[in-house]
Amino acid sequence: QVELVESGGGLVQPGGSLTLSCAASGSIFRIIAMGWYRQAPGKQRELVATRTAGGSTDYRDSVKGRFTISRVDAGNTVYLQMHSLKSEDTAVYYCNARVYSDYTNWGDYWGQGTQVTVSS
């Protein structure tokens, strides 16, 4: 089993910044990718940013240039730096990890979610 623990959410004014972190632990043989998704009230969960173990990143268009996903080298922690936050960024942010637990078995795991509220 893999556990993801998120932190860093909160209330911020429009134009402000926040950094989310997600630490993975447990039965991890190799991390394939880690990423962040978000879900606003009444909407479906959507991809925000992902980063593969090889360093490739992908962002949804609405956050490009404002958000940066990064991972500590050789570590199991991923960060999401968010700048120039807008009210439409308000959502619960979920960490996701795709992990090999051994040479052949892999699975997708989710954190409990952290609330980000952008409001004046």
Image (spheres, rainbow, N blue to C red):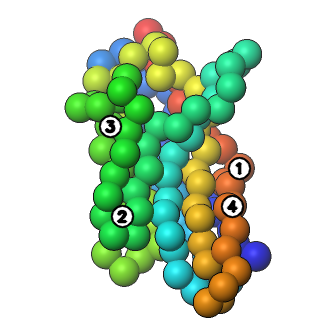
Q: Residue furthest left?
A: 65
Q: In this picture, is 104 found above or below 73?
A: below
Identify the residue under disc 3. 67
Q: Is residue 24 left or right of residue 55?
A: right
Q: Residue furthest top?
A: 120
Few, some or many C-alpha atoms within 10 Å of disc 3 (few <14, some 14-19, many ≥20)? many
Identify the residue under disc 2. 71
Amino acid at pointer 4: Tyr
Q: Is residue 92 left or right of residue 18?
A: right
* Secondary structure category for the residue under label 2: strand
Amino acid at pointer 3: Phe
Q: Is residue 38 left or right of residue 15?
A: right
Residue 17 falls in image quadrant? top left
Few, some or many C-alpha atoms within 10 Å of disc 2 (few <14, some 14-19, many ≥20)? many
Are dots 3 and 4 in contact, CB under 8 Å? no
Q: Residue furthest front?
A: 104
Q: Could you say where residue 39 lies in the image, as x and y percent from the top left?
A: 64, 29
Please state which of the two labelled residues, at mark 4 or mark 2, is closer to the viewer.
Answer: 4
Identify the residue under disc 4. 109
Q: Residue at x 68, y 55 (%)?
A: 110
Identify the residue under disc 1. 112
Gap in angstroms between the C-alphas marked 1 and 4: 10 Å
